Amino acid sequence: MSKFYLTTTLPYVNAPPHIGFALEIVQADVIARWRAARGDDVFFNTGTDEHGLKIYRGAQAEGLDPQAYADLHAAKFDALKLALNLSYTNFIRTTDAHHVAAAQEFWKRCADRGDIYKKNYKVKYCVGCELEKTESELTDGRCPLHPNLAVELVEEENYFFRYSRYQEALLKMYTARPDFVVPEKRLKEIINFTAQGLQDFSISRLKKKMPLGVSVPGDPDHVMYVWFDALVNYISALGWPEDEKNFNAFWPGTQTAGKDNLRQQSSMWQAMLLSAGLPPSRQIMIHGFIMSAGQKMSKSLGNVVDPFAYAEEFGTDALRYYLLREIPTLDDGDFTREKFVARYNADLANGLGNLVQRVTAMVEKYSDGDYPPRLIAPVRGESGQKVDSFVKKYQLDQALAVIWERISECDKRVDEEKPWVMAKDPAQREKLERLLSDLVEEIRGIGETLAPFLPETSGRILGIVDAEKVKPPAQPLFPRKD
């Protein structure tokens, strides 16, 4: 049994969960389920990032103690497990005592390497990104990702990380591991960024200005910069540094991240790991933005979609399907209600749901729910191999496209061979039974292959075809929506 570690990024708890994070964690869930189904021992991590200036200000705005504020919002993110039918095995919070201790130990190891020093600096800062910004990264003086937030000028004495020391080591790693960042175009972006030269970055804040953070070891006047502390979650989740056995068994892991996290995840974090004497991540899968009316969704812009509302109205698997099929796994995609309903009706109600309904109804009508088992399930053959190939490349949208091609082929076969005509001719009884057997086994194969993507629907399909008597579902798998 192979060990497989997969982690999402940690969303800030300054606002309720939105569809962008739902996309990332559903994509990760498919990969985790797919690996588990193949016998891997999977450690699937997610959680919440609860430090930093925007969290502190969010708590102040609501008149709450920062910890109470974090507790309130963290619970909403953990509630996604039920709403989206997620299989994660660990939910970490950066306010957890063990994580705080791990972040401090990580700091000490980087300091022992000579990679942490103190200096005065002046910088433009986007609170929305919790990142320093150069003039070239701004549009009309504002961050393009958070145009409604004024860029702030920060001037103080902070600790810095010697990021510049790791330029050559990172470039060598990217060259040696051409699949380190997927897709390839994002790897090229980070290579170009690194080749232009890395600048040391601030890793602390004055506690009197921003008290919400992990205390810097040996300096009570400073707390860790949120990005430094939060990234350590990927290893503290495994019990690092105390549980070396578990850490060494699962690390390095695979990470999922949005493209606006490319620099932090695939460069800054990797340099920090090298500084602490730890192996870099195995691989990083970068997904794009979800767009609405051509505009990136953003909590700060207030144009986000509530995943809980869509899951409640359409069902968990319907939401999972749209996110996995309509949004290109490794690129940007659109989310509109009109597209959602259209995809739901065409692919789920009229596609998969209708196929299961009509085939099982014919088996019940023409064979009293019995059929000769043939155990061929072609979707688990060539089509199943194609699905596996796409999942290995993190092209989940293409994997689903293969399954839906099979669904269309089954529908076409029913239309062409007309079992209702065969049923009227006793001479075609054997042919009818063979057709029904093939179709039921096709549906079984589709159900099995869908398990990582639409687990609830997969279970319902397999329950229907594995029953003592095959009959149509009492309720449609996906009732049509007007």
Image (tube, grey):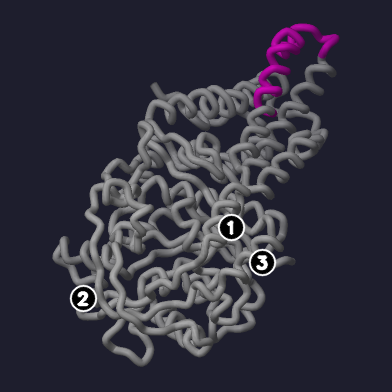
* CA–CA distance in space, label 3 to label 2: 39 Å
Left or right of 185? Residue 40 is right
Crowd class of label 3 (few under 14; some 14 to 19; many from 20; radius 10 Å): few
Q: Is residue 363 visible?
A: yes
Q: Tell me the amino acid under the disc marked 3.
A: Lys
Quadrant housing the N terminus: bottom right
Instruction: Name the foreground residue: 438 vs 268.
Output: 268
* CA–CA distance in space, label 1 to label 3: 10 Å
Which one is earlier in the sequence, the residue at label 1 or at label 3? 3
At numbered mark 1, what does the secondary structure look like: helix, strand or loop? helix
Q: Quadrant of residue 42?
A: bottom right
Single out the mark in the foreground, 3 or 2.
3
Give the x, y percent position of residue 393.
67, 48
Residue pointed to by mark 2: 209
The magenta stretch spans which residues?
Answer: 406-428
Give the x, y percent position of residue 138.
33, 51
Instruction: Name the foreground residue: 200 vs 439.
Output: 200
Give the x, y percent position of residue 4.
65, 64
Residue pointed to by mark 1: 191
Give the x, y percent position of residue 322.
49, 36
Label placed on residue 372: none
Label placed on residue 172: 3
At numbered mark 3, what does the secondary structure look like: helix, strand or loop? helix
Q: Tell me the amino acid under the disc marked 2.
A: Lys
- At x 35% / y 43%, what residue is drawn? 297
105 in the magenta segment: no
At numbered mark 2, what does the secondary structure look like: helix, strand or loop? loop
Instruction: Name the foreground residue: 307 vs 24.
Output: 24
